Structure formats: structure tokens, C-alpha cells
Image (spheres, coloured by chain):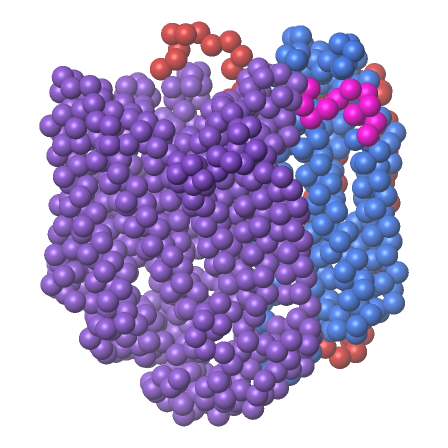
Chain colours: A purple, B blue, C red
């Protein structure tokens, strides 16, 4: 253990004396600017970084979606090639799920959870930084496939011997976001490992594997934080609902991701070493991939939607001026949804022929899952009912969430009936269904969250008229884009189709859907531009502009590094609201003050360890391409990873003391530390 | 250890140390991980009970391939390493660093023996004609036991680093004991996974004359 | 009881640790005996379902003995036990279902949806 945390308290970390870790290196505690952001262990900065990357990838995924819609606007269109089309819908799905929604949810987890439970940081600050950078590099590896694809299309790779030897030259993944075997796998006898697809699939495998590691590490950390770091008096049934949903989401992640991790390892062995897990010509069962994928994939659906449900459960009470209706029921429903989510995976596979008993069982369980979801909807309606509703931008988006999510839920229940599902399978009806859930549900929820907490994150207020305009465009464009797809699907238009002939009766609604998609895209872009502008130039606002209910609103905006100058002691649910309007005040522990608050030291090591994934992630697909010596890149990557973790372990946690301006006993934390 | 209010030393809401809690969460997650691997092996055993065809074209049953004496020996070794690990953790709690070092050296030694047995077993099977490429059985068997072996190897590496770290004098007190205990939890988990694998993958092949899965349909081989 | 005091360990703590020490030795002996019994059992002429049941019980017994004593779950907070057992039960249920799904060997085409 290090004895280096014996500083005198300082008002700002730049005033610290330089200090060496157990390795003899100077800790990057005093830094500002780029170095500060790269080495930060502050959950708020990590949350902001997660959010920035997620919003960037949302736009990337959006551009991919618009290319798809442009191609489908007219019959017999040749705007993009069929191959590029396959790559686009694969990367659109993968990007939106793993690089858009999950990290944006993670941004909220990071920023809000410690604030909502009255903690000064997460349980493992450096592990948190490791999760962030692992996500960043995993995302980069996945998207680097595009760089190779474009280099190939431009002809830059033609002079290389390894490129001439390639059988398949698709460099970006093109298997759909689920990469079903055997298309993603191999065929042929005795380990010849002939593949159906090019190295795009290898990029996908390693990219998802690395992103999975990031999600797992973050989830262990958050479960630990929520269970172990609650403020005094913050019992489990006083936790804000968003924190509860974070907990359930994290539990789902740690139990669902191992299945995909193993499935990816098996697929990797098939492709790289000629194993036969999913190789049909050697007796492998491709349907096993579907099972393993959906054992992960169905809980993943709830991993995507539960955080958005948590966000809406915070926003509705705030703008209805009422406590959340049926708090215990909402929490319990969330837990039931999470638990049942593990018992319904085969409803994605009705058409594989499971047999009558499993089909009936999975049908019934799937219908059962609609019950807790419906319970939540009624609780939200009960919250608004009789309230004094303020139609602020977050509230508008939240109301949109309830409505759109409900539509998605209705078409979801239709799928639970196996005979109906076998008609709808692989048609545009399915596209319509899950976009209503993921866009109308998750995206509206996350946008509502962004508008709701931006004033807390940056201390600045988004421009309301633009926010209303963007919300309206998103909701209108979204319905215009995906509403007609219900009809298209039932009229027989298949999923993942590059183009279609005229005369099927699909022309009009495809054209409408494309117009809707562009309105939607413009709306999302407008909203993100509005938010980005707000972060730097928005009008300053008070620390609690909305009349918030939970602990984060009791803090100044932007939140000081140490969060709470004095640790709060909570006496009730909705502690901050009760503190101002009810009888139960928030008490404060007599810590902090002159002695200062203990802060964890910043560190380069999480970034160094994550860099290993960058090397390994690039090396694996390059090995598959046949690039000479690429195996050494992989080995270097694993070496860097192990070295990073070892240096991280022996450098010692360090830490320093930060002076807070608050005098002991004063409930209101004073001004932010000036930088 | 640290006199200041280190975030990691602060009392937790549940009274459980962060590190211990996160390790148990990791192990809970690892249950699903090994569950997936073991069930992949088992369901392919069920579908293709007849083993594999070696390079000479002979049908080989898995019972004739396995060497139950060797596997029993390595199982015993791993169980005893778990016992020594428990003693090493106990020694750290009592602050007996020398006893800790003795026991942890034993664990490392036994872990290396286990890995040696596995290398021998893999080589032996390979020469008998079972490869990762020539059958589904080869793929599932090598990847399942190999992944377990990788877990053992990571554990050995972890303990070796910890052994040497103990000479710096920084491994001590409550935090040091906690670090050792967490490494111990990982080691024991690797052990209990092997307890399951030993029964589900090895022993059941000896039930009755043809093993639990029978010899069934002709194997789909290449 | 997982954490030792900072200074010299107290008397009760040492007594407790010694008691655990003896438990560990007893358990190690039992683990060896049970493993030996398992290996003998598979070669005895007993009907397969019986052997399979006994083997499963022995394996589960060893499994829980290790997590309870070696991994201190019996001494630690109840929460840790339930975290692990919940995950274990979920794993068991999920993969039992998966194995059962693969038992449909012959499928009548008219069953398929």
C-alpha cells in the first residue's frame, strides 16, 4: 500500500506538489487539458466522454441508415451496391446498439449513479476509466473495417500479395448484427476452414468481444457501487428509479454477455483455427449459434431499454409535480422484466422448428413479459394523472416515449404468437416493431435524459424552441419512417433486401418511409447540435432549473469534482424534493470541510492496458487477411494488456485531499472549485 | 494501512469489501461463461456419441482415448492446491507472511503440475488422432478444457506475481489479506469448475459399457 | 469476519482462524476421499441411473463444500452467497433448457409452426 496520499488539502488539484507513484512515475494528478481527460478517473468526466463518443456514433449509424433508406426510396435503385448495402445494414445495427445506445446509457450511469446515491465516486475509479477506453478502442476496431473497405474500393490494396490471395474481399462486416452461422462461419472438411465471408466478420467478432469486455467491467463496477456505496439512510427502496434500473441492467449484462463471449470464441476458433462448432459439413450445428446469440441477445434488448425506462421514471414525476406512482411496483416490474428476459430467447427462433412444447412454452413466457411492461406504462400514466404537468422538452420526449414504446410493445406481443410470428419473420414488420421499441422507446428516452440532465452536467440550459422543434421532427419523422413499415412487412416486403421490383405495391410507402427517415435524421442532428452548442455556449442556469427530486439536484452545476462537500444522510425517497417541500430534511455528515475530501489519483495505466485491445483488435483481422507478421501485433497487444494491468496493480491507488469551501454543518455546498 | 480516508477503506453500505464483492460478481458471471462451454460440449456429445475418426480412418470411442488415471491425478492435484490456497489466505489473515509464502508456492507448484498434465493430455490425444479440426468432439473438448487451462494459467501468473510482490513488504495488513483472499476466490472457482468438468466430461464416459452417451449413431466425421 | 484487524490479531480471532484451519484440513481429506470414491464408483456394476445420481450428488457436494468453506461463504455475508447461487441457478436453468431443446431429434414437418 502506498503512503503517498499524505498531502495537505488543496483547493484545486493544480496546486498539488508533484508526486510519484510506487512505480516512481509522476502521477498525472495535476494535469489539465488533454492529459487530464486521458487519465481522468472522475466518473463525471468519464460519463461526458462516453456521451460524446456515443453521440458521434449515433450520427455515424444515422448516416448509414440514411444510405439504406436512400437506396430503398425507389424500386430497382442502384444508389449503392448490394454488397455495400449488406455492410451498411450490418454496421448500422451493430453501431446503434453497441456504440450508440449502450454507451449513451453508460454515460448516464456514470454521471448520475454516484450523484443519485450520494457517493463521491464509483467503487473502482480506474476500472471505470479502463471500461471507457476499452469501449473507445473496441468501437474504433469495429469501424476500422470501413477504412479497409474504402482502401480496397479505391484500389490502394491491390499491390499487396496478401490482397491478391484473398478469396473474399469484403472488409466491412456484412452478416447482419447477429452474424448467424453458417454464413459467418466456415464450411468444408478437416479444418480447411473455407469461409463464406471475408475479414469483415473477423472485425465484427473481435470488435464485439472487446466491447463486451468493456461492458462487463463497467457493470461489475456499477453493481458494486450501487450495492456498496449508498449514502447513510439510502436504503435500497429509497434508491432513485434510474439507479434501480442501472442495477438491473448491470446484472443483466454480467449474466448475458458471457454467452456471447463464448459464442464469439467458438466462432473465432472456427474461422481462425478450423474448429467445427458451427461447421455444418463436419456435424456442427449452426442453430447453436442462434441459441447462444439469443441467450445473450434477448436480455440485451432489456439492457437497451431499461435505462431509458429509468430516465423516464425520473422525468415524469418531476414535471408532473407528483411522486412516482407505485414506486415499489415499478422497481419490481423492472426486476421481473430482467428475470423473464432470460427465459424467452427462443422466440427469435420460432421458425427454426423447436417442436411444439418449446414453441408453446416460449410463446407463453413472451406473452407473460408484456405484463410487467404494461404495469410500468400504467404506473407512468398514474404519475401524470392529476398532476400539474409542465410540457418542457424532456417531458414532451418522455410522453412520446410512453406512446411510441407502447406501439412497439403491441407489435411485440403480436410476435409472441408463434403462428403469427412465422408470417412476420424476416419481414419489414419486424423492422417496424423493433424500431418502435428502440427508437420510439430508447432513443426518445435517452434524448429526454440528455435534455433533462444537460443543465446539471454543464450548468447551461439548452435552447428550448430548438429543443421543441427537434423533438417534434424526431417524433414526426420517426412515425413517418417506421409506421408504413408495418404495412410493408405484412404486404410481404422482406428484411435485408437490397432492392425490389416495381409493381409489388411497395413503392409509395417506401418513398414515404425515406422522407420520414430524412426528417428523423435532421431532427436528431438538430437536437445533438443544440446540445453540443449548449455544452459550450448555452445560457447559464441555476443548479436546479427543473425542480428536481433526487440528490443530484442538490449539488451546484457543474458538479464539483468531489460531488458532495459533505456526505448526505437521506431520510426518505425523493430526498431533495422532500428536503425543500416536505418535512424530512437532508442531513450532512461532518466530513470534508477543512480536512478536505479524499480524491482518487489519476492514472495512465487503464489507458495503457486498453491500448492492448487496439493492437489485438487490429491484429486478429489482419491475420485473417493474411497480412505477414500480423500475429506479432496480436501478441504485442496481449503483452501490452498484461503489462498495463500489472503496472496498474503495483502503482498503488494514491489519492490526494481536496479542500471544500463548505463550512462544517452547512447544508448548501458553496461555489465550485475554480480552475 | 493508509491513515487517510481512502475510498477503498471507507466502510461500505453492506459491510462487504468492494474487492471481494466485485470478485464474487465476476465469478457469478463466469458461471454463465463455463455453463455455455460445458453445455456446448455436452449437447454435441449427445448428438454425436460415437467419438471421432482418426487419421487412419479408424473409428475411435472417447472411452479408449481418455486416461482416467492421469485425469484423476490432476483432479486430485487441483483439489489439494485449493486446500493450500485456503491455508495461504488463512495465514495472511493471521499476518504470517512466511507461512503465506510457503503455501502459495505450493499452490503455484500444484497449478503448474496440473498444467503439465494438461499439456501431456493434449499431446497424447493429438497423437491418438483427436484434433481440433477433425471432429466436433475435438473442437468442444480442446476449447472447453483449454479455456479452463487458460484460467489456471492466469491464476498461476497472478499468484507468482503476488509471491514476488510479498517481498517488497507492501503486501500486508487488511488490504494485503484482502488482495490474497480475492486471488484465492478466483483459484477456488477454477477448482470447482474442474470438479464439474471432471464429472460431466470425463466420468460419465465410463458409465456402463459404452458410457453415458452410448455409441449411438455413426459419427459425422470428415 | 473476513477482515483481519490492523494491529496484532486478537485472541478470539486467532482461535477462530485455528478452528477454520482444522475445518480446511478435514474438508481437504473429504474431497480426496469423495474423488477416490467417484473413480471407484464408475467401475462398479451398478445400474447407470443410480451411478449417475450418486455422481451428480457427489460432484454437487464437493462444489458446495468448496464454495462454503474454502471460499468462506459460510463465514461471510449472506448476500455473497445469494449473488453466486442466483447466477448458478440461472446458468443451470438456461443450459438445461438448451440441452432439452436439442433433444428434439425427429421433427414432424407439420409441427413446425
Q: Give the range drawn in magenta.
A: B123-137
Which quarter of the image is occupied by the N terminus of chain B?
A: bottom right
Q: Is residue A105 above or below residue C108?
A: below
Residue A294 against residue A529 in the figure, above or below: above
Residue B163 place in picture, x, y as percent: 81, 62
Would residue C77 be visible to someone looking at this image?
no
Query: For residue C64, what is the image quadrant?
Result: top right
User: In the image, residue A47 lies at what x, y percent?
Assistant: 40, 63
Is B132 in the magenta?
yes
Residue positioned 70% across, 45% down in the render: B151
For the residue pair B84 and A261, the one nearer the viewer reads as: A261
Q: Does the magenta stretch include residue A142?
A: no
The answer to whether any part of residue A663 appears in the image is: yes
Residue at x 58%, y 44% (from the top left corner): A619
Q: Which of A416 and C68 is in front in this view?
A: A416
In the figure, is residue A542 to the left or right of A122? left
Question: In the image, is residue A74 above or below residue A42?
Answer: above
On the image, the x and y values in percent for residue A89 come to 33, 35
Of residues B2 and A159, the one drawn nearer to the viewer in this rendering: A159
Q: In which quarter of the image is the C terminus of chain B?
A: top right
- Residue at figure coordinates x 20%, y 67% from the top left: A462
Against A597, residue A388 (above or below) is above
Q: Where is residue B201 in the image (x, y as percent from the top left)?
A: 72, 28
The mark total stands at: 0
Q: In this view, does A480 lie to the left or right of C49?
A: left
Residue B50 image-quadrant placement: top right
- Look at 14% across and 50% down and name the residue there: A473
Camera-side residue of B185 and B134: B134
Amino acid at each position: 500500500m502506498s503512503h503517498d496520499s499524505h498531502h495537505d488539502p488543496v483547493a484545486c488539484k493544480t496546486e498539488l506538489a508533484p508526486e510519484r507513484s510506487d512505480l516512481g512515475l509522476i502521477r498525472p494528478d495535476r494535469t489539465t487539458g488533454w492529459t487530464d481527460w486521458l487519465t481522468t478517473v472522475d466518473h463525471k468526466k468519464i460519463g461526458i466522454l462516453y456521451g460524446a463518443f456515443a453521440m458521434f456514433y449515433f450520427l455515424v449509424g444515422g448516416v448509414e441508415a440514411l444510405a439504406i433508406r436512400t437506396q430503398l426510396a425507389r424500386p430497382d435503385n442502384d444508389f449503392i451496391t448490394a454488397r455495400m448495402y449488406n455492410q451498411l445494414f450490418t454496421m448500422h445495427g451493430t453501431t446503434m446498439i453497441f456504440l450508440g445506445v449502450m454507451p449513451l446509457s453508460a454515460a448516464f450511469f456514470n454521471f448520475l449513479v454516484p450523484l443519485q446515491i450520494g457517493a463521491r465516486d464509483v467503487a473502482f475509479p480506474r476500472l471505470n476509466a479502463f471500461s471507457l477506453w476499452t469501449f473507445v478502442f473496441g468501437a474504433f476496431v469495429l469501424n476500422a473495417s470501413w477504412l479497409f473497405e474504402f482502401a480496397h474500393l479505391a484500389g490502394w490494396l491491390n499491390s499487396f500479395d496478401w490482397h491478391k490471395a484473398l478469396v473474399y474481399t469484403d472488409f466491412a462486416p456484412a452478416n447482419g448484427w447477429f452474424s448467424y452461422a453458417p454464413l459467418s462461419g466456415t464450411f468444408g472438411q478437416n479444418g480447411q476452414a473455407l469461409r463464406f465471408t471475408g475479414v469483415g466478420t473477423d472485425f465484427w467478432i473481435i470488435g464485439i468481444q472487446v466491447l463486451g469486455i468493456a461492458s462487463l467491467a463497467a457493470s461489475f463496477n456499477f453493481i458494486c457501487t450501487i450495492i456498496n456505496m449508498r449514502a447513510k439512510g439510502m436504503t435500497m427502496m429509497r434508491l432513485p428509479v434510474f439507479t434501480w434500473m442501472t442495477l438491473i441492467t448491470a446484472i443483466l449484462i454480467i449474466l448475458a454477455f458471457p454467452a456471447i463471449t463464448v459464442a464469439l470464441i467458438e466462432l473465432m476458433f472456427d474461422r481462425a483455427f478450423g474448429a467445427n462448432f458451427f461447421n455444418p459439413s463436419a456435424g456442427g450445428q449452426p442453430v447453436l449459434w442462434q441459441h447462444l446469440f439469443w441467450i445473450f441477445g434477448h436480455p440485451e434488448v432489456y439492457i437497451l431499454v431499461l435505462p431509458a425506462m429509468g430516465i423516464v421514471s425520473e422525468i415524469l414525476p418531476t414535471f408532473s409535480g407528483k411522486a412516482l406512482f407505485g414506486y415499489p411496483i415499478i422497481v419490481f416490474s423492472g426486476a421481473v422484466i430482467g428475470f423473464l428476459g432470460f427465459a424467452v430467447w427462443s422466440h427469435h427462433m420460432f421458425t427454426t422448428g423447436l417442436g411444439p412444447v418449446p414453441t408453446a412454452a416460449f410463446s407463453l413466457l413472451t406473452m407473460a413479459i408484456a405484463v410487467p411492461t404494461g404495469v410500468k406504462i400504467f404506473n407512468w400514466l398514474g404519475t401524470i394523472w392529476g398532476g400539474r404537468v409542465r410540457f418542457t422538452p424532456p417531458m414532451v420526449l418522455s410522453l412520446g416515449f410512453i406512446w411510441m414504446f407502447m406501439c412497439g410493445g403491441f407489435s411485440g406481443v403480436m410476435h409472441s404468437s408463434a403462428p403469427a410470428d412465422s408470417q412476420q419473420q424476416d419481414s419489414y414488420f419486424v423492422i417496424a416493431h423493433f424500431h418502435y421499441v428502440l427508437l420510439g422507446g430508447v432513443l426518445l428516452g435517452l434524448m429526454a435524459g440528455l435534455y433533462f440532465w444537460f443543465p446539471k452536467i454543464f450548468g447551461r440550459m439548452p435552447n428550448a424552441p430548438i429543443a421543441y422543434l427537434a423533438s417534434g421532427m424526431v417524433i414526426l419523422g420517426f412515425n413517418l419512417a417506421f409506421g408504413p413499415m408495418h404495412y410493408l412487412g405484412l404486404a410481404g416486403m422482406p428484411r435485408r433486401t437490397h432492392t425490389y421490383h416495381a409493381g409489388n405495391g411497395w413503392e409509395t410507402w417506401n418513398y414515404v418511409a425515406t422522407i420520414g427517415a430524412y426528417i428523423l435524421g435532421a431532427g436528431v442532428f438538430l437536437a445533438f447540435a443544440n446540445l453540443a452548442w449548449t455544452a459550450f455556449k448555452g445560457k447559464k442556469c441555476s443548479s436546479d432549473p427543473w425542480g428536481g427530486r433526487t440528490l443530484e439536484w442538490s449539488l451546484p452545476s457543474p458538479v464539483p469534482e468531489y460531488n458532495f462537500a459533505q456526505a448526505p444522510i437521506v431520510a426518505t425517497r425523493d430526498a431533495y424534493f422532500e428536503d425543500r417541500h416536505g418535512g424530512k430534511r437532508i442531513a450532512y455528515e461532518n466530513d470534508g470541510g477543512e480536512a478536505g475530501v479524499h480524491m482518487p489519483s489519476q492514472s495512465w495505466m487503464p489507458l495503457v492496458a486498453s491500448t492492448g485491445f487496439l493492437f489485438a483488435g487490429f491484429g486478429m483481422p489482419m491475420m485473417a487477411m493474411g497480412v505477414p507478421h500480423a500475429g506479432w501485433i496480436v501478441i504485442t497487444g496481449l503483452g501490452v494488456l498484461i503489462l498495463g494491468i500489472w503496472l496498474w496493480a503495483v502503482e498503488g491507488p494514491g489519492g490526494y485531499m481536496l479542500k471544500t469551501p463548505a463550512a462544517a454543518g452547512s447544508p448548501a455546498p458553496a461555489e465550485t472549485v475554480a480552475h | 494501512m493508509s491513515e487517510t480516508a481512502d475510498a477503498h477503506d471507507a466502510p461500505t453500505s453492506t459491510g462487504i469489501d468492494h474487492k471481494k464483492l466485485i470478485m464474487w460478481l465476476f465469478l457469478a458471471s463466469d458461471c454463465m461463461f463455463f455453463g455455455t462451454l460445458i453445455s456446448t460440449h455436452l449437447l454435441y456429445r449427445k448428438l454425436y456419441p460415437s467419438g471421432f475418426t482418426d487419421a487412419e480412418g479408424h473409428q475411435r470411442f472417447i472411452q479408449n482415448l481418455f486416461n482416467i488415471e492421469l485425469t484423476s491425478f490432476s483432479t486430485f492435484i487441483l483439489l489439494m492446491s485449493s486446500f493450500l490456497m485456503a491455508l495461504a489466505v488463512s495465514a495472511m489473515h493471521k499476518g504470517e507472511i512466511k507461512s503465506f509464502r510457503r503455501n502459495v508456492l505450493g499452490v503455484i507448484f500444484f497449478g503448474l503440475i496440473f498444467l503439465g498434465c494438461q499439456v501431456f493430455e493434449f499431446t497424447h490425444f493429438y497423437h491418438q488422432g483427436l484434433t481440433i479440426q477433425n471432429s466436433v468432439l475435438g473442437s468442444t473438448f480442446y476449447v472447453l478444457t483449454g479455456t479452463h487451462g487458460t484460467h489456471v494459467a492466469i491464476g498461476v501468473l497472478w499468484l507468482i506475481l503476488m509471491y514476488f510482490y510479498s517481498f517488497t513488504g507492501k503486501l500486508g495488513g487488511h488490504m494485503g489479506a484482502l488482495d490474497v483472499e480475492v486471488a484465492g476466490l478466483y483459484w477456488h472457482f477454477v477448482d470447482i469448475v474442474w470438479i464439474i468438468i471432471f464429472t460431466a466430461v470425463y466420468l460419465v464416459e465410463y458409465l456402463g459399457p459404452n458410457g453415458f452417451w452410448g455409441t449411438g449413431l455413426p459419427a459425422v466425421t470428415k | 469476519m473476513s477482515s483481519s484487524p490492523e494491529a496484532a490479531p486478537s485472541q478470539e480471532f486467532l482461535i477462530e482462524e485455528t478452528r477454520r484451519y482444522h475445518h480446511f484440513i478435514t474438508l481437504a481429506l473429504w474431497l480426496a476421499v469423495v474423488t477416490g470414491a467417484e473413480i471407484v464408483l464408475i467401475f462398479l456394476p451398478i445400474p447407470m441411473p443410480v451411478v449417475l445420481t450418486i455422481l451428480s450428488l457427489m460432484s454437487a457436494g464437493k462444489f458446495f463444500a468448496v464454495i462454503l468453506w474454502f471460499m468462506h461463504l459460510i463465514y461471510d455475508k449472506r448476500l455473497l452467497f445469494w449473488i453466486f447461487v442466483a447466477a448458478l441457478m440461472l446458468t443451470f436453468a438456461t443450459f438445461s433448457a438448451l440441452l432439452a431443446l436439442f433433444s428434439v431429434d425427429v421433427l414432424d414437418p407439420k409441427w413446425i409452426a
